């Protein structure tokens, strides 16, 4: 049965909503998460789960870089906390290996190496022989690559499951199949939510609805209420199976990642289609991903095709998430718009959002404020 009240209600049971709930539950906050379908049913379950700020965050965009590096720092302790509580999110700090197949790609990687090697993370160039020693089934057309040992990967679905289970034990309430239909409003204050199963009163509501986060702005029906500029970007991924073969870490070429999974399957990701809100697995997506995987590992041409899946990423106009309070609407905040890096950025996002919800100080979230649009 749905609670009548809570300290914080979170809309959306993806990695962002569940991570915030976990951080709040650790601080004894009465938090309720409402998910309209199933936990991790959206992008968080379709993800490749690669944790690689070095290749996915521009170091010149300082707030994003800090969010990425803080998340990288938090992942190992978060994963061991969750594992010790009995649910392994399958995080592995196995490194990330980016390969070059053309002189142009090799030059580009070498240029990046100049700043990456100053980070103290042990990032190094491996020449062709070293690359093949590390990944013996890699294509002999490889010219070399950059190995970054402190990065890694996690299984998105397992991460969300473990957050739900461990936070539940700490007192958080999670509900699936409960769609939020509207906010409860008192003047310019949001005081809870209206759902398909009744209302929940709460002084704080967090919108973490992934690519659907733009729609609830309409519920405010308030003059001057901000647009929430989160748009959908579809992505597909596939699973292959080749007994006896798994890359040692996520291996990237210019087209896709090949990622090892603990169950022995090989995940290949991802495509990117702007403004698409469907989860259809397409022939074009699958064939693109197979070609990209075979470029790195020719023997994958003989792998069993296991399955395909699509998800919808939540993207914003400037590539940064929207985090923090909604101006002029008391009691409502947002944590959405993480695009291709939401799994990676989830620990630091949750840390900052939970801190704001506890002390009301949004200073650290300022660069991510919706007011920037
Ligand atoms: C193919 C693919 C590969 C990717 N690879 C990576 C990667 O390697 N590394 C990485 O860091 N990121 C990756 N991403 C991106 C990452 O998965 C997303 O950024 C992240 O999962 C977004 O999480 P979220 O919680 O914001 O959204 P979601 O996971 O979409 O969760 C939002 C939830 O809100 C629910 N919801 C919406 N509206 C309502 C409502 N009204 N009431 C109740 N519930 C509602 C939805 O059902 C959904 O479950 C990838 C994404 C895709 C699609």
Image (spheres, rainbow, N blue to C red):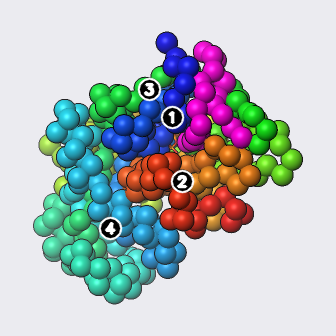
Residue 359 in view: yes
Asked if the residue at label 2 sits under 8 Å from ligand 1, the reply is: no
Question: Residue, x 58% and y 32% (percent of image)?
Answer: 202
The C terminus, quarter of image? bottom right
Q: Quadrant of residue 107?
A: bottom left
Under tag 3, what secondary structure? Answer: strand
Residue 164's place in the image compared with 362, above or below, is above
Residue at left 70%, top 30%? 184
Q: Residue at x 20, y 39 (%)?
A: 83
Spatial CA distance of label 3 from label 2 is 24 Å
Q: Are marks 2 and 4 in contact (CB under 8 Å)?
A: no
The CA span between labels 3 and 1 is 14 Å
Which mark is nearer the camera, 3 or 1? 1
Question: Where does the image place residue 82, in percent across and percent down from the top left?
Answer: 24, 40
Residue 194, magenta (yes or no) = yes
Instruction: Give neighbour class at mark 2: few <14, some 14-19, many 20+ (Cα, 10 Å).
Output: few
Q: What kind of element bears circle 2?
A: loop
**Mark earlier in primary sequence (1, 2):** 1
> Counting other residues with Cα less than 10 Å from the Cα at mark 4, is it few (<14), some (14-19), or many (20 or more)?
many
C-alpha separation, residue under disc 4 versus residue under disc 1: 44 Å
Q: Quadrant of residue 54?
A: bottom left
Comparing marks 3 and 2, which lies closer to the viewer? Answer: 2
Q: Which residues are magenta?
A: 189-209
Q: Earlier along the polypeptide chain: callout 4 or callout 1?
A: 1
Q: In the rendering, which numbered label is found on residue 174? A: 3
User: Which residue is label 2 attached to?
Assistant: 360
The main secondary structure of the magenta stretch is strand
Q: Which residue is mark 4?
A: 98
The tag earlier along the polypeptide, 3 or 2, is 3
Residue that badge 1 annotates: 7
């Amino acid at each position: 049965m749905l609670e009548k009240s809570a300290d914080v209600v979170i809309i959306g049971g993806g990695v962002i909503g569940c991570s915030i709930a976990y951080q709040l539950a650790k601080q004894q906050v009465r938090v309720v998460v409402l998910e309209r379908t199933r936990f991790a049913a959206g992008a968080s379950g379709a993800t490749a789960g690669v944790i690689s700020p070095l290749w996915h965050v521009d170091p010149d965009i300082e707030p994003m870089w800090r969010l990425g590096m803080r998340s990288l720092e938090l992942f190992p302790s978060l994963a061991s906390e969750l594992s010790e509580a009995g649910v392994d999110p399958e995080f592995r700090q196995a490194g990330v290996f980016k390969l070059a197949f053309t002189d142009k790609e090799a030059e580009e990687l070498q240029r990046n190496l100049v700043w990456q090697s100053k980070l103290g993370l042990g990032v190094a160039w491996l020449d062709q022989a070293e690359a093949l020693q590390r990944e013996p089934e890699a294509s002999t057309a490889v010219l070399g690559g950059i190995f970054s040992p402190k990065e890694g990967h996690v299984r998105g679905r397992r991460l969300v499951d473990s957050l739900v289970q461990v936070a539940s034990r700490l007192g958080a309430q999670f509900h699936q199949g409960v769609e939020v239909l509207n906010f409860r409003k008192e003047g310019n204050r949001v005081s809870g939510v209206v759902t398909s199963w009744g209302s929940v009163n709460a002084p704080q509501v967090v919108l973490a609805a992934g690519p659907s986060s733009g729609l609830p702005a309409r519920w405010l029906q308030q003059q001057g209420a901000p647009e929430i500029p989160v748009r959908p970007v579809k992505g597909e991924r596939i699973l292959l199976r080749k007994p006896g073969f798994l890359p040692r870490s996520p291996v990237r070429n210019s087209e896709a990642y090949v990622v090892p999974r603990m169950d022995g399957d090989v995940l290949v990701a991802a495509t990117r289609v702007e403004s698409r809100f469907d989860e259809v697995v397409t022939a074009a997506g699958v064939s693109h991903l197979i070609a990209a995987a075979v470029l790195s590992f020719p023997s994958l041409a003989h792998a069993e095709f296991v399955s395909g899946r699509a998800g919808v990423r939540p993207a914003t106009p400037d590539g940064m998430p929207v985090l923090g309070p909604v101006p002029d609407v008391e009691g409502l905040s947002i944590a959405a718009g993480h695009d291709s890096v939401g799994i990676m950025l989830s620990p630091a996002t949750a840390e900052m959002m939970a801190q704001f919800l506890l002390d009301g100080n949004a200073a650290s979230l300022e660069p991510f404020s919706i007011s920037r649009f």
